[in-house]
Every structure is written in C-alpha cells, then in structure tokens.
Amino acid sequence: MVQYRLIRGLLILGFVIGGQWNLWAQWSGLRGKVVDGFSGKALGGVRVVIHGKQIEGRTDSGGLFFIPLQEPLDSIRCRFVLDGYLPREFSNLSIRPGLDLGIVSMDPEAGENPTENFIPLSETDLFEADVLGGNPGFLHAGRDVFLNRAAFDFSPAFFKVRGYDNRNAAVFLNGIPMNRFTDGRPQWNTWGGLNDVTRNPRYHMGLEPPELGFGGLTGTTVMDITPETVRKGFRLTLSASNRNYAGRLMATYNSGFGKQGFGFMASVSRRGAAKGYLEGTPYDAYSVLMGIAFRPVQAHELSLTGIYASNLRGRSAALTSETLALGGRRYNPYWGSQGGDIRNSRMRYIAEPLVSLRYQYTGPAVRYTMALAYRKGIQYRTRLAYFNAPNPDPAYYRNLPSFYWNRSFGPNLISAEASRAGFLKSPQIDWAALYQANQLKGDAGAAAYIVQADCSEEAQFSANTFVEWDFGSGWALKAGGLYQNAGIGNYGRLDDLLGASFHRDKDPFSKTQNDVYGVLEKRGRDRIGYNYSVRVDQWQSFLNLWYTRRKWTSYLSGLFGYTGYRRTGNFLNEKYPNTSFGQGKQKQFPDYGLKGGVRYQISGRHWVQFNTALLTRPPVLRNTFINPRERHGFVKGLKCERLQSADASYFLRGTVLSSRLSAYYTRIMDQAGVNFFFSDTGYGSAFVQEIATGLDVLHKGLELGLELDLSPSVQLSGVVAIGDFKYASNPDLRLYFLPGDQPRDIREAQGSLFLGQAALKDKNIPAGPSKAFGMGIQYRGSAYWWVGTTINYLSGQYPSPSYLRHTRGFLLDPDTGQELTGAIREEYPRALKQKALPSLYLVNLTGGKSWKRGPHYISLFISVANLLDAYYLSGGYESGRNGNLKQWYQDQLSGSPSFGTRYWPGFGRTFFVNLSWSFL
C-alpha cells in the first residue's frame, strides 16, 4: 500500500510538474494574431521570423501564431511576411513570459508607404548650393508615425528631424556606409529609382547603435538588398507626377532562393520630364540593379550586387523677394529657349556605379558579416561663365528695378520702370545672344561666354566586417572594423564654347593663368580653371556590449579610428606658384566616441529608453581646405568636431493606441564653415573665402507621435515637434582673398584678414521649422481601398545668416576705414535682427486601392500634396554681398533691396499617381 501511494504520488507530482512546465513553455514565448489591415480577416500562412536567432513560425488558418522560446530576448526584430502584403516589422522588441502582440495588421500592397513615392523636388540636390543642409526625413520612413509624417507631410517645408541635416543620419547599403566624405551626407542618387528593392529598410532610432557600426545621431538606416528581403516574383510599376519627374516606368524580378540555393534579382527604372514643377528643370534618370546570391545551407550566404544609377536634371535658383514678385513662384532664371527646346545652364549629373560583395554567416549564437564595395563615377554641375562681358543672368541685380531705386545719388524711376518692363519681356537666358556675342567679339576668337562644368570624379573602396555574438547569461557583443579609401578628383571642364573658337584660361579678377604648365587657349572638353585631387583614408573600429536582465537592457558602445586628407594639385596656379602644384601635406583627424543606453520594460507594451553619447568626428572635406581649387592649405585652427547628445523616450505599443514621446539634447562643437562669394566689406571689395571656426550649435526639443484606432476602419494620427535650435558660441571669422590694386579693393598684403568673433551666440540656426504640428485621419474600406488626409502647421524657420554682419568689421565705413556713427549706426540692430519665414499650413490627401486575382496583385496609389495650393517659402539665406553697414543701409532704403535675403519658394499643389502589378 505504501509503495502504491508512493508511486501514485510521484505520478501526480510528475503530472503537476509536467503541467507547470508545459504551462511555462506555453507562456515563455511570443503570441498574437495576424489580420488583413482592411477587412480584418485572419491571415494564415504568415511567416513570423525572429531575425538573428534562426527562429521562425507561421500563423494557422485563424491567423494565430505562437513561438516558444527558451529564454527572454531583448532588442530583437520580429518580421511578418506574406506574399501580396507589405512586410510588417517590430524592432527593439523585448520578449518576456506572457507577451502577446495582440492584433497585428498587414496591409496589401496597395497600402504602400506614401513616403516611398514622395521625394520632394525642393531637396538640396536641386539647388545651387547646399545651404539648407539636406533633408533626411525620407531616409527614415518606417512604422514610426512621427518619422512617416516628417518624411511625407513636413519635408516640403524643409523640416529636419531634430534639426539635424543628413550628415547626422548614417545609411548602410548591404553593409557598406553610404555617407560621403565631401559633405558627410548619403548620396540618394546612388540607388535612386530602385524603390522596389529598397522599400523596406530597417531603422535604428536615434543614438542606439546598429549591429554593423557605431550609428548616427538622427538614427541609422540599413538597407539589405537580397532575395530574402525583396518580394518574390515580378513587379511592374507606372507612375505619373508633376513634381520632379513626369513619368516613371519600373520593373523588378526576384527569384527568391531556389532548391539549389541560388537567388537572382533584377530591377530597372526610367524617369523623365521635359520640366518639373519649377520652370526649366528637365529630368532624365535611369537605374539598373543586378544581384545574385548563393545560400548552400541556411547558415551561409554570399551575395553580389551591382547598381548603376544615372541622373541628369536642371537646377533652380534661390530668389530675392523682388524677383519672386516679378517672376512668380515657379520662376527659374537658369534656363532659356534654344531652337525651341528648354536649355538649363545649370544642370546636375550624377553616375556612380556601385558593386558590392557580401558574405554572411548566421549561427545560433554567432552572426558574422564581411562586406566589400567599390564605387567609381562622376558628378558635375554646369554653369555659365563670362569673361570681360556682362553677366548673362536675367535676374542679375543690374537687370532689376531695384538697381535704379537704390542708387546712392537718388532713385531713377524712369529707368526702374524700363528695367521692370524689360525683365517681364525677357526673363530667361538669351542663348542666341550669347552665341552672337562670342562670334562678334574682336579678341581673336576668345570666348566671352562658355558653359563650364564643375566635376568631381570619385573612386572609393570600402570594407566593413562585423560580428554579433550572444555568449549567454544575457550578454551580447557586437564588434567590427571599417576601412575606406577614396581618391576624389575635382576639376573644371569646358563643356561648350557657345560658338567661340577657344577659351583663354585666365582668372577674370587677377588676370593670372590657371594652368601655367598647360596651354593658355583651351578647346573641346579641356580641363580649365582648376584641377586637383584629394586622397582620403579612413579606418574605424567599434564595439557594442549589450547586457539583458528580466526587465532591463543596457549597452555600452565604443568607436575609435582616424581620417586623413591630402591634396594633390594638378595645375600650377600663377597666383600661388609655390603652394598650388604637387602633393601637399596630410592632415589626420582622430575619430572616437562613446555611447551608452538603457531600456526598462515596464510591461510587454510599455517601455522607456535613455541614450547618451560623447564623440568626435573629422570635419567634412568641404570645410577642411581654405580654397583647394587654387592651393594647398588647411583651414587655420581646424579641429575635430565634438558632440554631446542625449535622448529619452517613452514607447507605447497597444492594441488601440501606439505612441512615442521623446526628448533630446545635442551640442555640436568646434565646427568649421567655408563660403565663397564676392563682398563689399568695410575693408574693401574682393572675391573672398569666408572661414568660420569654433562654431557650436545646440539642438533640443520634444517629439510626439501617436496612432489611435477608432475602429478597424478608422485611424487617427497626430504628431508634434517642438525644437529649439541655436548657435551656442561666437565663432572666429577670417577672410582670404587676392589683394587688389584698384581703389576699392582689399589691399591687405597677406591676403587674409582676421575679423574677430562673429556674435552669433543664441541666434537661430537654419535647421528647418522648429515647430510642427499635424493631425490626420485615414479610412480603410473593406473592398481594399483607403483614403486619408492630414493637416499640418509649421513655423519657426530661419534663413542662413550672413556671418559678416555679426563682426565689428561690418561697422567700418569703406570710404574712411573708421567705425560708422550717427543715424546709420543706429540701424545696426535692424541689420542683425533675424526674421523667421512665414508660418504655413499644408493639407495633403492620399488614397489607394488594390485588387487580387489569384497570384496577381494590382495596386493604385494617389497623393495630392499641398491640396489648397498654399504659397510658402521653404528656406533661404542672407546675402553676403553687402559686407558693411553703410552699403547695407543704402540698399534697404527703397524697401526692395538688391541684395536682400534669397528664398527657395515652396511647391504649390502637386500630385503623384502610382500603379503597380505584382505576380509570381
């Protein structure tokens, strides 16, 4: 009996323990239900993939899934994939016992992310100079409602996430960083037009480091182009728009991985327009991608990808208030009619083919990647150059009425009216007149006008290797090394003699020869003006250490490396015979950083996160040399930039309400800036290089984004961004120039002037709107159609200031060399006062529908931006021409200054239509 009771007790205990174990196993995993985002119907057969863990499951016929796990997991990505639907991904997920994701909705392919289709024409790639610092929003579109709205609704007004430019956003393509050495920004045109294969990037928000590097300040975008990440089958797309291009044709095929382990991809696109939204902006672009991957077993993958993207488009100009009033919001002075065709004098061309090779190993605890890439290509910008001839720009200040209003000896109203009438009659470039002037010029056939291209040829090799190792007890290590070297050749090219016999290659100001060892008379497509190259060497190593407990996840990340620059001159410039030709000295900049962060999981749906960073980074090439076109010479006092940053966020991922609230603080110190322009300063007139060093800026603010599902069909969204972007120091300012011999020239024999500090501290920096608010509503019909509208308000945007105005030299009388006094001196505060651009409201409308017939999916997407056709200014900069208070005051008297602030006009009502057909 005792033995029987003992056996019975053991059996009961076993059943209890087994039941408890089964109950624990049941709850120590991830569960949820996947439904169609339109109809609410359950979706069976959805792949649920936990990346990096070799863990995968599928939903049953009721849309339910459960993935058992042996231990809690943190900072993982969970991806939902089903043919005919857009992939859905949750990032930074922490899985604990009992975590239920609830209802996970997946949108059919008609529900395309509108940001994929919206790349505004007003991006800085179209402009004469990158004065606005780039627009990073479209690189970060994802499931985060705030970033989506910033990309689609706010970007036309040059809203920048946290006030940062693109340099602070790290972008990786197949494991290779795509940020350029010249300006630190990713070059979108390298993969432009290949939307089908780049439409599902991973985004690591803010300071948190990714698995393949140290990351950026704004965040890190990771684009993996493999048969695993691209939708399997064929996809054809037709698009129409009145923004940057009029039409687009795109075709993509992905075989997926076959039984033999091979996968093939191909994607091509063609985009073009006789003109974009602005006048005289032709567009001609095509892109090709070919890729092959081999996966002999699940753990190993080798992929080879080649990309060729060519982009040629016309640029537009920033305009003064006077020119905008005369020409209208679509006016562009850079073009004219030639033989009945539009010819833009300022075209931009980019073609930089990229080949990448990547090997990946994915094991149960170790993941290793080696990525290699080689990129070689050219980009150039054309412009009209003139020599001993009038400026051909129809919007040149001497061709406008204000020139006659603002004369020092009094206005000439008759000439002003004649100038206005002449401008309205002929507001564009007269190409025929330029040819005629070259043919009539009595200088033995030398050109008075030419079209010159400023070219940059770059060849860059990159190698990035990194490893992820989960070595148990909650510890994980991510480490790697990056090496890059680039040779960047920069030169002027003679593109068109416009009917002349040759071009005499001399500096028009100093009359000195640009290429002493070369011929003076240049023809064909000879190199003119300048010819130099810069060698860049960079290596970096990083280490990220992660530690996870039941509710806590923390990390510590380190970076160390260096970047070296060296200039080699290929022209001997007569102005600088000892410092222009041959190889210059190399300057190296150390590169190190430290990041740390912690995340606390309040529950499966609530968590908070804090990140902080201290780092240095080298100055970008464009701010490193005084004037590399003419000579060696690094900017005096140049240092590595220093950055301090912190952010804190609260996340809610509920079944009805999802939101993110973030606060951030960033101080960037010891920046440098280099600008080139002609200026009438208090010391005299010259074409100057303005060098600012020791420039600090401060970014701080709040972000809020939320989505509320009122019903399965109706969703509300709201976003708020409140920022404060200020200069945090008074930088040192220097001018470099060639001393002149005319009465009003700057005659300083050393060719440089130290102007002291520019009083910029606490002034607003040009970082886009500092305040943005948006509300939206979207309705989803059961027949797979949807429509949505958003209302957005933006304010607090300031033009780039003129640094010269904020120095004591601005107060000097150019006639006497003494400081100004009296009534003119009293106008000094008005000259320094910053004036914000007008606030604006933007209303946008989007909609779409999809049809499914067997394996065929047809989707239609339509968007209308600025539905109410609101007029607004998207950015601007103060002119540095009036470099002394006396001349600035005289220019202001009429109320229509000749050298007033220049503005980029925003777009009016624009549309985009996208029709795609997908099939296996």
Image (cartoon, rainbow, N blue to C red):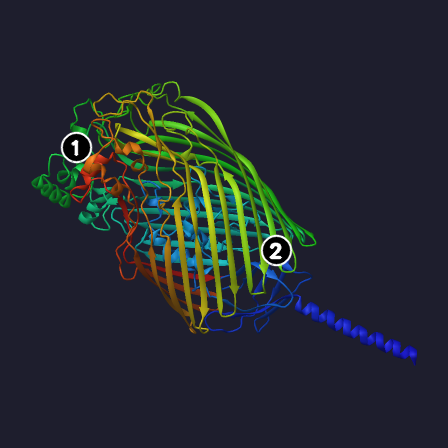
Q: Residue furthest bottom?
A: 1
Q: Residues within 10 Å of mark 1 (few under 14, many from 20)?
A: few
Query: Mark 1 highlights which residue?
Result: 436
Residue 916, above or below 684? below
Q: Residue at x 46, y 33 (%)?
A: 639
Q: Residues within 10 Å of mark 2 (few under 14, many from 20)?
A: many
Quarter of the image holding residue 257? bottom right
Q: Residue furthest front?
A: 822
| Quadrant where the image shows the N terminus | bottom right
- Find residue 790 and report its horizontal and vertical position in percent: 36, 64
Dot 2 falls on a residue whose secondary structure is strand
- Name the front one of labels 1 and 2: 2
Dot 1 falls on a residue whose secondary structure is helix
User: Which three-letter amino acid code belongs to the residue tagged 1?
Assistant: Gln
Residue 747, above or below 795? above
Quarter of the image holding residue 22? bottom right
Q: Earlier in the sequence, mark 1 or mark 2?
A: 1
- Find residue 321 and report its horizontal and vertical position in percent: 22, 47
Residue nearest the viewer, comparing 189 with 902: 902
Residue nearest the viewer, comparing 865 with 731: 731
Residue 370, above or below 771? above
Residue nearest the viewer, comparing 622 with 834: 834
Quarter of the image holding residue 141? bottom left
Query: Label for residue 553?
Result: 2
- Find residue 777 and report its horizontal and vertical position in percent: 39, 68
- Find residue 805 and report its horizontal and vertical position in percent: 29, 37
